[in-house]
């Protein structure tokens, strides 16, 4: 029987898939009591299609990292208090009255379809430790060669008391989550970068650009004609839940956190601190 997030070397085979797929995972922070793993991937699908695939883990989760040994036993209810759960079939030779078992891997605490999903729980061996694990997933539309693509970004933040050295367990979690994003990317189909029009100036200095680099393919800052106060008011009315497109992936997680925290502050300023 496989074990979810089994950190044996044999359970980490297949990471070479990442070399050819637009997906990656890395440990971006670590202390003696916790760590943060960031996982990103770009798929050739709309955010709605990517959301549907992500919330159907039975189609892409590596069965080696399940308790039952079968990904088909996994399911996820992408709504508040919904469960990322696994069914444990009745073992052979069990008494006729024995019922199937179950495992709650994570619980959904925030769900905004096609944009953001947040789950809490300790995956695998972390379930037996006194830690908190929070996974935030965002789905952001980006340009791709097929005309539509989605960048899936999730961060798994773990902290608390554990009987593992964080430098060991964080690396193992990083590798296993890399497998999962590779499986999801393979299921949906990896996205290729959108082709640059032939008329676009080169990003390297040359005769065509008179030594000036081409404009970066990112959202431009607001023109000065729009006052900062007006823009701030607009953001306050319609808070964003996805990473700021002017920021790179290295800051995306913090952008998501700030946006969601801003939303809850705006909805009820009476909430006491430390919620």
Image (cartoon, helix red, strand yellow):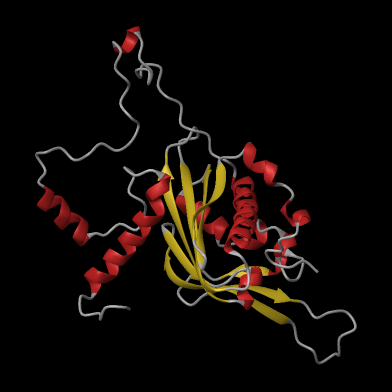
In the image, taking residue 61 as reference, residue 95 lies left or right, namely: right
Q: Nearer the viewer, residue 266 or 87?
A: 266
Q: Residue at x 47, y 42 (%)?
A: 149
Quarter of the image where the N terminus is located: bottom right
Residue 271 x/y as whole percent: 25, 79
Residue 236, by quadrant, is bottom left
Residue 108 x/y as whole percent: 49, 72
Quarter of the image where the C terminus is located: bottom left
Residue 136 x/y as whole percent: 46, 62
Q: Which of 171 and 88 is in front in this view?
A: 171
> Residue 66: in sight, yes or no?
yes
* Residue lying furthest top: 207
Q: Which residue is drawn at 66% across and 62% down?
A: 58
Residue 217 x/y as whole percent: 35, 31
Q: Residue at x 42, y 60 (%)?
A: 116
State whether residue 172 is above or below residue 17.
below
Q: Residue at x 33, y 30 (%)?
A: 216
Q: Nearer the viewer, residue 62 or 36?
A: 36
In the image, taking residue 212 as reference, residue 87 lies left or right, namely: right
* Residue lying furthest right: 93
State whether residue 92 is above or below residue 143.
below
């Amino acid at each position: 029987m496989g074990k979810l997030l089994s950190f044996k070397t044999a359970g980490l085979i297949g990471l070479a898939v990442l070399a050819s797929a637009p997906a990656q995972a890395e440990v971006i922070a670590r202390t003696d009591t916790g760590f943060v793993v960031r996982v990103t991937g770009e798929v050739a699908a709309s955010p709605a299609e990517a959301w549907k695939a992500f919330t159907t883990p039975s189609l892409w989760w590596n069965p080696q990292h399940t308790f039952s040994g079968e990904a088909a036993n996994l399911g996820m209810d992408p709504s508040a208090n919904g469960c990322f759960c696994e069914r444990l079939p009745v073992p052979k030779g069990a008494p006729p009255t024995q019922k199937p078992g179950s495992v709650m891997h994570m619980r959904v605490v925030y769900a905004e379809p096609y944009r953001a999903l947040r789950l809490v729980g300790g995956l695998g061996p972390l379930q037996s430790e006194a830690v908190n694990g929070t996974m935030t997933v965002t789905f952001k539309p980006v340009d791709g060669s097929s005309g539509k693509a989605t960048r899936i970004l999730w961060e798994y933040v773990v902290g608390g008391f554990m009987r593992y050295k964080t430098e060991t367990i964080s690396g193992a979690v990083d590798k296993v989550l890399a497998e999962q994003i590779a499986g999801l990317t393979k299921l949906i189909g990896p996205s290729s970068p959108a082709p640059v029009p032939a008329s676009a100036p080169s990003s390297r200095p040359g005769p065509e650009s008179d030594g000036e680099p081409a404009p970066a393919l990112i959202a431009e800052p607001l023109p000065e004609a729009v006052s900062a106060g007006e823009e701030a008011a607009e953001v306050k009315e319609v808070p964003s839940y996805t990473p700021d497109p002017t920021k790179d992936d290295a800051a995306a997680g913090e952008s998501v956190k700030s946006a969601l925290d801003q939303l809850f502050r705006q909805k009820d300023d009476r909430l006491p601190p430390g919620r």
